[in-house]
Amino acid sequence: MSSSALTGSQAQRAATVLVPRRRSWLPERTQSFLLLLPSFVAIAIFVYVFIAMTLYVSISNWRTLKMDLSLGQPPYATYLSMFAQPRFQADLRNTLVFTILFMGLAVLIGLALAILLDRNLRGRAVFRNIFLFPYALSFVVTGVAWRWIFNPETGINLFFNILGINPLLSQFGLEPLKPGWTTDPTVWLQVNKVLAAVWPPAAGLRVQLGIPAAIIPVAIAAVWQLSGFVMAMYTGGMATISDEVRQAARIDGATEGEIYRHIIIPMLKPVTISIVVLLLHTSLKIFDLVFTMAGPGPGFATDVPAIFVFEQTFRATRYNLGSAAAIFMLVLSGLVIVPYLRHSLKEG
Amino acid sequence: MTVEPASAAIKPAARISVVQGFTWLVLLLALGFYLMPVFVMVNNGLKEATNVSVSTMWNLPGQLTGGGFAEAARKLWPNMQNSVLMVVPATILSSLIGALNGYLLSKWKFRGADILFIVMLFGFFIPYQTILLPMVRFLQIIKLYGTLPGLVLVHVVYGLPITTLMFRNYFAGVPTELVEAACVDGAGIMTTFTRIMLPLSIPAFVVVAIFQFTNIWNDFLFGVIVVPNPSAQPITIALNNLSGNFSVDWNVVMAGALIAALPTALIYFLLGRFFIRGLLAGSVKG
Amino acid sequence: MVTRRRSVLMLSLVLALVLLPLGAYSATAAGPSGGKLEVFSWWTSGGEAAALDSLFKEFAKVNPTGEIINATVAGGGGTNAKAVLQTRLAGGNPPDTWQVHPGNELLGQYVEPGYVDPITDLYKSEGWDKVMPKGIVDQMTKDGEIYGVLCGVHRGNGLWYNKKVLDAQGITVGATMSFDEFFKAADQLKAAKITPLCVGDSNIFASAQLFENTLLGVIGPEKYLGLWNGSVKFDAPEVKQAMTTFGKMLDYQNADHSALSWDQAVKKLMDGECVFNSMGDWAYGEFVKAGLKDNVDFGWVGHPGTTGSFMIVADGFVLAKNAPDPENTRAWLAVIGSKAGQEVFNPLKGSIPARTDVDRAKFGPYHNWSMDSFAKDALVPTVVHGSAAPAAFQQALFDSVTVFIVDRNVDAFATALVKAAQESGFAE
């Protein structure tokens, strides 16, 4: 701490704390800004300028490999065409269903595992490591493995035979359990008719609004991949809850279950919010997993907007349609993220 | 106080074993669920090409002859090197810059800093399809297209928002008095950062580095678009190449998948404890 | 003084270092030597990679010191590769040469935007105009200039079957097959609890292929060609009839079709779990790899109704405009079109040569059959592999087939295709 050059001013500074004084060649605030500038500029270009370029393409006429940047007539024509496509409508339905399933299961399972492992079990670390392991894998790897597992002829369906479930069912005269998983084009709980009663144009929709059965195995694979991460987050969160809180509750006569329900879980709310935002963001732009595991699926039962963008841009070379879908994905993400960001901005 | 522990010791004793038993059961079932795909990959990776097919996927390999691992390792080794050469610098750079940014944004705020940060954070959430074509054009203009440094640049820039966020949250939990004390001692912004903040942030650094390493290692989209030359590509793309166009050697693919997953898996098994501890340090808060 | 001499020395050293490599690029009299050739394709697996390699070896005979960069991207029947290629082309950074399908893919995606140079002179100097059928050369010609050379031709309209199972059921397949015969056999198999039709459409192209073959079989080659120039509309009665027949065939397919890739479906056929598979003859390579014998374990016939037609699914290469090394590229193209090149490439790839003067003895029974057909049958382009129509229409077809498989709505299918044809500009 022998700052010879500053000994003189040290006495002066002893009286003040963190006042931006011109003691160095630039005020600290400006230094801070300048140090941050390269990052800001990089993001400005790589995110905002690029998005603007894509936005422009989405309202242009560029539909083949030959670049055609003339404006569409009307500019939003591509967007209209996009929403009118049964495939895109199916994508919206699938994203909604997948998101609810995936997030619900991942949070529940992650929380449950975190709670179960919260006790001093032997081999706790081993369990944690194994549950967290899938997070380390690439989505491509996961997709390939789970595609095999959910194959309707073999895969997990064989287990229903081995475990004796199917023989049991046939004893009762019931159909053997052999779900089609990702090959099943059925859409459960179709609400087309109900919707048409309220909103007549809905009768013309070719896409079936409901829960596509095929998206369930995809959601399961995604849960497998990410629930360990959720568990880790909750474990970390629970560790910040001091023991005294629990002891106090126990003294008051609360059971372990009640402690968790009424104290620990509510205290974990910030963690839950983080988790929900991260998972939501993942599920809105999911691509690798769905693509390798199921592709667009029978009747587009597992198609998602990211696959739509990929195919329209790189297979069909319809750059304006692909860009429009990409911008739409952006807007969708924005609807989720902007409130969250505003909320954290308020919290400082 | 003497009465309570006694009764507390008697009653829950019977309950604990039921609860514990139930816990163990659930955990073991979960174990099965989580390990099953790994079993599928290892099992089929060990088979010879002619034995492997979807209908025999649960059968154990007849003999243990290394299966697809030898060939997968041979094919993937150069790409493994590419991945390491690309991922390590990208992880370190994005983590370091993120640390600096996080530190500045939490301790040295200027007017509009928070808004600028939010604007930057939005970059983490964009779907990358939105920027693919403009990004390639840009890389070609600055002559980094098709190179590993170009890929590093891309991963660093798109990693900045999340690393900045994680460090900002972490540093927000570090008492400002430390910074003030350093200022009193005459340290500037950067000196405080390098001498005090950075060493303090090791737990967060580990978490951020693991997070970045995993994401960048497992990336497919950027890798395939930015680096078209197969000998220069990272391992995820090479793994996809193993799957060929019309016919697939599934045992090599399964083995290759495991090999590609090995580094990140090792990190998790060796450093998983630190990852969780890092979470304890509050590096990612709500 | 000393410093001055040293700086002169430094300068000459630097100049030498800069100018020396330039000397290496001076052209030599005979064919190209040295240099690099970047060959871009999506041939990354088994037989394809071996076939590509054989061409590299032939090229090495012409240019022993040249370096070949084998730029491949796998996956999705070329979609990943095409994505990478497009971004490179749009950015002015082309490979020297790349894999193309003739027809619309070549002309619409690469010739029209000006990404490739013509090689008409090569056709004359190498004598290809005499040995390659006009039908396929036309698919690479625009305004009198030819833009690519084909290395091999696959046949798209094939129907493969497990001969052992058919023999066991007492069903014989002749040299041709009609739809009636197919459905009769299929019913018999269904009654015997054997799945008649194998389909693996996790990549939907396989079902689109089945549709395309059926369409050709129902409406015939002339009307089929008419679809692509707008003279026949997609909601014409015959086309709708083809769609209905396609739907009927789907009733006989395996339940797990959308879980399997096309080659997994062929494997099922080989295992005897299903019997027929409509696929191009890249499927032949699967049989060979599994060690099965032509006409003993498996057999083939033209897809029902398509005898007399040959659906071309061909691969070729082009010369990039502003290719980094045009001389080596032209030498490469010459190798591809040469007799030697086609004779080593095609047996490994499983396709037949584009040249008609090759040594037949190098090819097995299936390929000889295919070559006979190629020589005399009506040649038609495939839409499923990008030749007959623009990529946007191809995608619309894929999407429509996906929906049709589930809802079997022929009218909606036809309307969707009519609309797509209008939007793609080849029909009004």
Image (tube, rainbow, N blue to C red):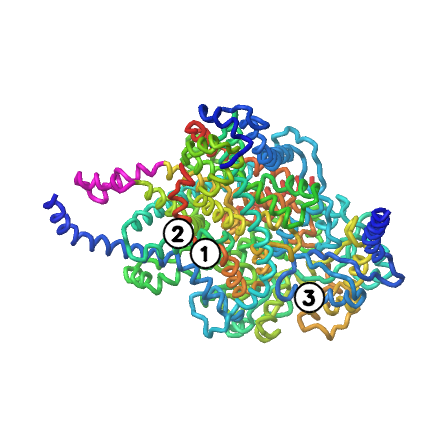
C384 and B173: which one is in front? B173
Q: Is residue B23 magenta?
A: no
Q: Tell me if I can see residue C282 in this picture.
A: yes
**Mark 3 near mark 2, Cβ–Cβ under 8 Å?**
no
Question: Mark number for residue B185?
Answer: none
Q: Secondary structure at mark 1?
A: helix
A288 and A116: which one is in front? A116
Q: Are marks 3 and 2 on the same chain?
A: no
User: Mark 3 — on which chain does it sit?
Assistant: C
Q: Residues within 10 Å of mark 3 (few under 14, many from 20)?
A: many
Q: Which residues are magenta?
A: A242-269
Q: Is residue A267 magenta?
A: yes
Question: Mark number for residue C51?
Answer: 3
| Residue that label 1 marks | A146
Image location (x, y in percent) of residue A164: 31, 63
Q: Quadrant of residue A45?
A: top right
| Residue that label 2 marks | B273
Image location (x, y in percent) of residue B117: 51, 32
Q: Is residue C128 left or right of residue C380?
A: right
Label the magenta part by its dominant secondary structure: helix
